[in-house]
Image: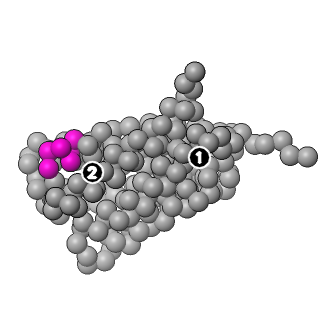
Amino acid sequence: MVTLRWLIAITAIIAPTLHLLSDVLEWTGGGFSSIQLIINYLGFLPMPFLMVGLYAVQRPRIGWLGLIGSILYGIAFIYFAHTTLYALEESIPNYEMLWRKLGGIYTFHGGLMIAGGVMFGLDSLRTKVLLRSAVLLFVVGIILNFGLALLPLPDILQTFGSSVRNLGLIAMGIGIMKNVPITPQNTK
């Protein structure tokens, strides 16, 4: 029988994999394409639910910091899903042009993603429920996104941080599927 825990694990594997595929298509295609943006949208759409689900599998050990972080991260991805549809509708050719059109509001939501992701990651590390290496990958990816945004580098390099972050989420999903304890273990 498929449980909610399994659905969360499967979503943690599929959604970031779609985002990763979308980034590869963007990188190899030199910008956006209709199919790439549709794949990106399908990867972004479940992200708010996924983050709340990853919070839930850590209950009761995870605290308010993790809940607030998962919600902020999810809010950012609600907006990012919208920007994907916007890019599709307006035939925006690449990330640089999308960012130029959306500017400050896009940057604000990027800040929500970074703050929320770090909060969620730190509380997840504290709980020791999800695979530590997976959570660390997720946090390192977020920090890379932040660092790359501050440097005068091509925006396409943001895909590097996103890839690391997505690999962390995928590893969390695999860890849940492999019976990573989601409740404290009785130790004697």
Q: Residue at x 48, y 65 (%)?
A: 140
Quadrant of res 74:
top left
Q: Position of residue 99 (x, y in %)?
A: 19, 60
* Left or right of residue 63: residue 46: left
Q: Position of residue 69 (x, y in %)?
A: 50, 50
- The residue singled out by tag 2 in the image is 22
Q: Are marks 2 and 1 in contact (CB under 8 Å)?
A: no
The disc, 2 or 1, on the residue closer to the chain's N-terminal end is: 2
**Foreground pick, 154 / 22:** 22
Q: Residue at x 22, y 72 (%)?
A: 154
Q: Residue at x 51, y 61 (%)?
A: 137
Q: Position of residue 130 (x, y in %)?
A: 62, 49
- The residue singled out by tag 1 in the image is 175
* Stretch of the chain drawn in magenta: 33-38
How many residues crowd around disc 2 within 10 Å: few (fewer than 14), some, or many (20 or more)? many
* Left or right of residue 82: residue 97: left
Q: Position of residue 174 (x, y in %)?
A: 54, 45
